[in-house]
Image: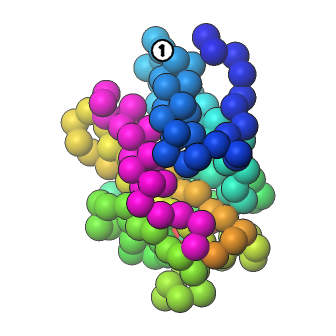
């Protein structure tokens, strides 16, 4: 196992995601427990980039997300599908990038310092939505296409990709 926690804050973003993806897959080699994987991904993505909040909301009922493994300040415990950025990503089944949370109607404020965020749907091998992965930044406009592609690749682990 690759027993280090990478700090990639000074690395070009595309390269950072490529390195992080390889590292996460090495650490998770042989793991088949999704909760263990969620805790590991939260830790490694959080410390790689140093954003405000990094973690999972799991699908626990047909239209309900409940907080799962995360790093950061206290997260809201439950989010209904359709509510906030997480609920939008869950309902639409696609990654949602928000450059300015104040301009996203219905954004749910867990940490008042959050200014921008990205939420990526997480699917299992059967293609069912099992969670969303939420990363929040204290700066506006932090996330872009490189983050979307990089995080979608990392989270493909849960679908066996
Ligand atoms: N910002 C999210 C809520 C979750 S937290 O910020 C941890 C949203 O609007 O979906």
Q: Nearer the viewer, residue 110 or 1?
A: 1
Quadrant showing the C terminus: top left
Residue at left offset 54%, top offset 57%: 134
Direction from residue 54 to residue 18 in the image, left or right: left
**Image quadrant, ligand 1:** bottom right
Q: Position of residue 1 (x, y in %)?
A: 61, 11
Q: Nearer the viewer, residue 69 or 5?
A: 5
Vertical comparison of 37 with 75: above or below: above
Residue 60 seen in the current view: no
Q: How is the image coloured?
A: rainbow
The 10 Å Cα crowd at callout 1, few under 14, some 14 to 19, many 20 or more, is: few
**Which residue does the image show at 31% across and 27% down from the upper left?**
160
- Give the residue drawn at x 49%, y 25%: 22
- Residue 109, by quadrant, is bottom right
Residue that mark 1 sits on: 29
Left or right: residue 71 compared with residue 116: right
Q: Is residue 161 visible?
A: yes
Residue 125 % position (x, y): 26, 33
The answer to if 160 sits in the magenta stretch is yes
Q: Is residue 153 left or right of residue 86?
A: left
- In this rendering, the count of numbered labels is 1
Vertical side of 15 occupied by 25: above or below: above
Q: Which residue is found at the position 72% from the left and 37% from the top?
A: 7
Residue 59 lies in magenta, yes or no?
A: no
Residue 48: % across, % down: 67, 41
Task: Specify the segment rendered in magenta.
Answer: 141-161
Residue 47: image location, x then y, percent: 71, 41
Magenta region, main secondary structure: helix
**Farthest left residue in view:** 126
Give the quarter of the image for residue 138.
bottom right
Look at the numbered disc 1 and give the secondary structure of its residue: loop
């Amino acid at each position: 196992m690759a027993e280090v926690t990478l700090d990639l804050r000074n690395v070009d973003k595309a390269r950072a995601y490529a390195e992080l993806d390889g590292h996460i897959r090495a650490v998770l080699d042989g793991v088949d427990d999704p909760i263990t994987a969620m805790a590991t991904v939260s830790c490694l993505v959080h410390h790689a980039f140093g954003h405000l909040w990094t973690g999972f909301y799991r699908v626990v009922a047909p239209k309900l997300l409940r907080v799962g493994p995360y790093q950061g300040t206290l997260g809201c415990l439950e989010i209904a599908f359709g509510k906030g950025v997480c609920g939008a990503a869950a309902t639409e089944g696609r990654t949602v990038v928000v450059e300015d949370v104040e301009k996203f109607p219905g954004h749910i404020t867990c940490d008042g310092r959050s200014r921008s965020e990205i939420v990526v749907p997480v699917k299992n091998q059967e293609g069912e939505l099992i969670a969303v992965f939420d990363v929040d930044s204290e700066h506006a406009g932090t996330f872009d296409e490189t983050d979307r592609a990089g995080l979608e690749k990392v989270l493909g682990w849960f679908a066996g990709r």
